[in-house]
Amino acid sequence: MRLSAQGIGWQVHGHRLLDDISLETVPGENLGLIGPNGSGKTTLLRILAGLQKPHTGHVWLGEQSMYRMRQRDIARTVALVEQQAMASDRISVHQAVSLGRTPYLSPLRGWSDQDEAIVSRALHDVGIEHLKSRLWHTLSGGEGQRVQIARALAQQPGLLLLDEPTNHLDIRHQLSILKLVSALPITVVIALHDLNQAMDCDRIGVMEDGRLVDIGPPEDVLTPYRLHQTFGVHADMLDDPQHQRRYMRFRQIV
């Protein structure tokens, strides 16, 4: 499923948070969104997920306008994992992940063995099977974030949007989640703070003051000019021949 946006704009109290953003995903790609805090990544993801309607511009899923679709149908196609990982509801982890099946349930279509199998698989994929009986609100931030990702996977979306999903995770679980996401046979749009992690994306979009200032393969986008202009840092490129990739080491601008 292709996701496309044209001329997206959003403002609050006269302050423009998004300014004329246009992009289109490539089916099956992993598209990273990077940019400083406050650059508009979270707002853009919420609009792309259909949770907010832009003040200007439009979003399409395939050839269909998102704003002519039922929320249930959008939820069968797009899943969003937001930064806030915890919930105050006294529900178990299993129940929380099971909410991902809600778009598929109706008075004529109740819970099935297939739904249970999908939830079990999602719990397994993010490594939280042992937590399924725990109450969600008692988990650590990192555990709660993995519950959110499992719930999104239980939706079986064609498009997965993630807003800094590794924010609350230790490095082992960061790598585990990123490996899992990159292996999914779906289109992924993921906002990241770690630019070295972003280098593993197929393409990167750079946000700056509510604008999409660059988009393309990591090696074309993460240039010394862009790192200086957008992030205010110098970067040294280091080669890792063992893994056949490059890393960045950052230095402050004096």
Image (tube, grey):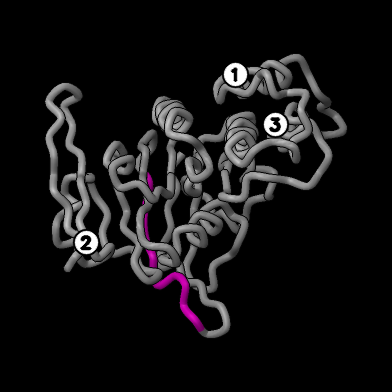
Above or below, 56 against 45 in this view is: below
The residue at which mark 2 appears reads as: 252
Of residues 238 and 3, the one drawn nearer to the viewer in this rendering:
238
Amino acid type, label 2: Gln
Of residues 96 and 202, the one drawn nearer to the viewer in this rendering:
96
The span shown in magenta is: 15-25
SS for dot 2: strand
Of residues 61 and 218, the one drawn nearer to the viewer in this rendering:
218
Identify the residue shown where x is 56% and y is 78%: 12
The percent position of residue 93, horizontal first and vertical second, equals 73, 30
Q: Which mark is residue 97?
A: 3
Q: Nearer the viewer, mark 1 or mark 2?
A: 2
Identify the residue shown where x is 74% and y is 34%: 96
Q: Marks 1 and 2, Cα distance to the nearest angstrom?
A: 41 Å
Above or below, 124 against 46 in this view is: above
Label 1 packing within 10 angstroms: few (<14), some (14-19), many (20+) = few
| Residue 186 in view (yes/no) | no
The residue at which mark 1 appears reads as: 124
Asked if labels 2 and 1 touch by Cβ distance under 8 angstroms, the answer is no
Q: Between disc 1 and disc 2, whose residue precedes? A: 1
